C-alpha cells in the first residue's frame, strides 16, 4: 500500500491537510504493518506500506523530521526545487543526516495509491476505557482528563457510576455533553458491587481491547499507546500490564508493604514507583502462589474476557487477580510495559484492595484459632486418659479437676470470642491482643497441669509402694 500525504500542518482547515497530531496517531496505527523504503516495495505483499509526505512551504520541516524519527520508519519526502530554494544552505542535508528519510523532487509512482486525509484511520482493533466511580466524584475530573490527554485516544470512554451519593453523575453528564461521540455514561439504580458493575460496564462497550481506570486514579499520557501496542503485535498476548506509581496520603505506607525487589525509586518525594516482574515461568508460579503483580487497570482482550466468563465473585482475592489468573490458566500470555504508566492514588483504608487484604488477615487468624482448638482437644484426650487410669480421687486429682474446670471455662471463652471474631473484621482488630493473652494463659495452665500430673503419678507410685 502506497500512502501519500499532500501536506502536514499544525492546524488544518481542509481534510486533505493532515495535522501533526493526526500524523502521529496514524503512524501509531500502522505499527503492525511493515514500513519499507519505496525501493523495496512489493505491491503483492499486503503488509508492505510506503509513506510519501509532500513537504510544502508551510510545513515545519524540523518538526516533521523529528516526529518521523520517533518511529524509526523509512519515509519518502517529496521536496520540490521551489521549496528547496527557500531553505538555508545545507539545512536539508543536516536535518536528514542519520535518518531513514529519502528525498524525491516529485511523486512519480504510476500505480494505485491512497491519499491520506486528516480523518483517515488505519487501525484494526478498537479500545475502550471504562472509568469506574463509586463516591469518587472529587477525583473523577482528574481521571477523565488523563484519558482525554492520551497520545492515542480510545474509541470509547464509558463512565460507570455504581449508584454514588456524590456529584459523580453531574460531572459525568458535563463530559458526555462535551464529547457526545466519545464518552458514554452509565448509572446503576442500585449499588451492584464491583463484580456486577464491572461485568455490566464491559457489556455496554464494543471494543476489542478493554481497560478499567478507577475514578481516583490517573493514566500517564502514553498509557493506551504503549499497552495497545503490546496487544497489537502479538495475538497470543491477552493482557498488557505496567508498573505503577503510588501517590496520595497513604502512598508511603502502601509502598513499604511491597516486596523489596518490587520497590522502585521515589520521585519528588511524592510518587513511589513499584516495578513488577516480567511475565515469565517464574512469574506464572508467583501468580499460582496467590501473589498478584498484574494490576486492575491492565489492558486485556475482550476475546480472553469472554472466554473465561468475565469477572467472578471470589471473596478471598481481588476480582481483577481472579480474572487474569483464569486467563493465564487458559493459555493467554501477558506482557509488561517497563514504565509506571498508571498513577495509583492511595487515600483511604476503605479502598477495595485494602479490604481484600483485611479479609486475608481474617482468614489467617481463623486458621490459627482452628489449629489452637485442635491442640486443646488433643490435650483434653490425654488428661481424660490419665483420669481413667487413676482409681483414687485424692487431693491431687481434685486439684487437677479444678484446673480442668477452669480450663474448660477458658475454652468456652475462646470459642465465644472466635464466634464474635467471625462476625466482624473490626472486632478482630480490637480483640486480637486479648485473644493472644488468653492463649498464653492457656499455655501456662497446661504447663501447671503437666506438673500436677507428674506429681499425681509420683503420689500413685508412693501409695503402691505403701500397699506392698
Image (cartoon, rainbow, N blue to C red):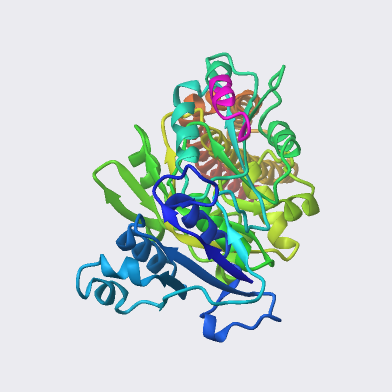
Q: In this rendering, would 202 be left or right of 183?
A: right
Q: Residue at x 43, y 56 (%)?
A: 8
Residue 182 drawn above or below residue 242: above
Query: 448 or 183, which is in the foreground?
Result: 183
**Furthest residue to the front?**
82
**Residue in the foreground of this view, choosing between 240 and 353:** 240
| Residue 103 lies in the magenta stretch | no
Above/below status of 461 relative to 286: above
Which stretch is magenta?
172-183
Residue at position x 35%, y 72% in the image = 81
Q: How many marks?
A: 0
Give me the residue at 36% from left, 51% from top: 273
Q: Position of residue 128 (x, y in %)?
A: 63, 43
Q: Quadrant of the N terminus?
A: bottom right
Query: Can see residue 142?
Result: yes
Q: Left or right: 439 with respect to 97?
A: right
User: Quadrant of the rendered structure where residue 402 is?
Assistant: top right
**Which residue is situated farthest in the left direction here?**
89
- Residue 192: x percent and y percent? 71, 25
> Where residue 210 sits in the image (x, y, percent)?
65, 47
Residue 280 screen position, x and y as percent: 57, 70
Q: Residue at x 56, y 64 (%)?
A: 335
Note whether residue 340 is visible.
Answer: no
- Placement of 276 over or under 93, stated as above or below: above
Residue 143 versus residue 32 in the image, above or below:
above
The residue nearer to you, when weighing 330 against 339, is: 339
Q: Is residue 177 magenta?
A: yes
Amino acid at each position: 500500500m502506497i500512502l501519500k500525504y499532500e501536506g502536514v500542518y499544525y492546524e488544518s482547515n481542509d481534510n486533505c491537510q493532515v495535522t501533526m497530531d493526526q500524523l502521529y496517531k496514524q503512524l501509531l496505527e500502522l505499527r503492525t504493518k511493515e514500513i519499507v523504503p519505496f525501493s523495496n516495495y512489493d505491491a503483492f505483499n499486503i503488509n508492505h506500506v510506503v509513506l510519501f509526505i509532500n513537504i510544502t512551504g508551510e510545513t515545519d520541516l524540523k518538526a516533521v523530521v523529528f516526529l518521523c524519527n520517533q518511529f524509526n520508519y523509512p519515509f519518502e519526502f517529496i521536496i520540490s526545487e521551489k521549496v528547496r530554494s527557500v531553505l538555508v544552505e545545507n539545512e536539508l542535508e543536516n536535518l536528514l543526516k542519520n535518518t531513514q528519510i529519502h528525498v524525491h523532487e516529485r511523486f512519480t509512482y504510476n500505480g494505485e495509491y491512497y491519499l491520506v486525509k486528516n480523518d483517515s484511520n488505519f487501525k484494526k482493533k478498537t479500545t475502550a476505557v471504562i472509568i469506574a466511580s463509586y463516591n469518587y466524584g472529587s477525583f473523577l475530573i482528574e481521571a477523565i482528563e488523563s484519558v482525554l490527554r492520551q497520545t492515542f485516544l480510545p474509541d470509547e470512554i464509558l463512565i460507570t457510576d455504581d449508584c454514588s451519593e456524590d456529584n459523580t453523575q453531574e460531572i459525568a453528564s458535563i463530559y458526555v455533553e462535551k464529547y457526545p461521540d466519545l464518552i458514554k455514561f452509565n448509572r446503576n439504580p442500585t449499588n451492584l458491587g464491583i463484580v456486577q458493575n464491572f461485568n455490566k460496564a464491559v457489556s455496554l462497550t464494543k471494543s476489542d481491547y478493554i481497560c478499567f481506570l478507577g475514578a481516583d486514579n490517573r493514566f500517564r499520557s502514553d498509557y493506551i499507546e504503549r499497552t495497545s501496542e503490546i496487544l497489537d503485535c502479538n495475538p497470543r498476548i491477552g493482557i498488557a500490564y505496567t508498573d505503577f506509581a503510588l501517590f496520595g496520603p497513604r502512598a508511603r505506607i502502601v509502598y513499604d508493604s511491597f516486596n523489596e525487589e518490587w520497590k522502585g525509586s521515589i520521585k519528588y518525594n511524592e510518587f513511589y514507583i513499584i516495578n513488577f516482574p516480567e511475565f515469565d515461568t517464574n512469574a506464572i508460579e508467583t501468580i499460582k502462589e496467590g501473589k498478584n503483580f498484574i494490576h486492575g487497570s491492565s489492558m486485556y482482550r475482550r476475546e480472553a474476557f469472554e472466554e473465561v466468563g468475565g469477572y467472578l465473585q471470589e471473596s478471598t482475592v481481588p476480582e481483577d487477580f481472579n480474572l487474569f489468573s483464569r486467563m493465564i490458566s487458559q493459555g493467554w500470555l501477558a506482557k509488561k510495559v517497563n514504565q509506571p504508566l498508571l498513577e495509583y492514588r492511595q487515600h483511604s483504608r476503605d479502598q477495595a484492595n485494602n479490604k481484600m487484604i483485611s479479609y486475608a488477615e481474617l482468614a489467617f487468624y481463623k486458621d490459627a484459632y482452628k489449629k489452637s482448638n485442635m491442640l486443646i482437644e488433643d490435650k483434653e484426650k490425654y488428661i481424660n486418659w490419665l483420669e481413667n487410669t487413676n482409681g483414687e480421687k485424692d487431693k491431687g486429682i481434685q486439684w487437677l479437676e479444678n484446673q480442668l474446670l477452669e480450663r474448660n471455662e477458658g475454652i468456652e471463652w475462646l470459642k465465644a470470642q472466635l464466634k464474635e471474631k467471625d462476625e466482624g473484621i473490626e472486632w478482630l482488630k480490637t480483640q486480637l491482643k486479648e485473644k493472644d493473652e488468653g492463649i498464653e494463659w492457656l499455655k501456662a495452665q497446661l504447663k501447671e497441669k503437666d506438673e500436677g500430673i507428674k506429681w499425681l503419678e509420683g503420689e500413685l507410685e508412693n501409695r503402691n509402694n505403701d500397699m506392698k
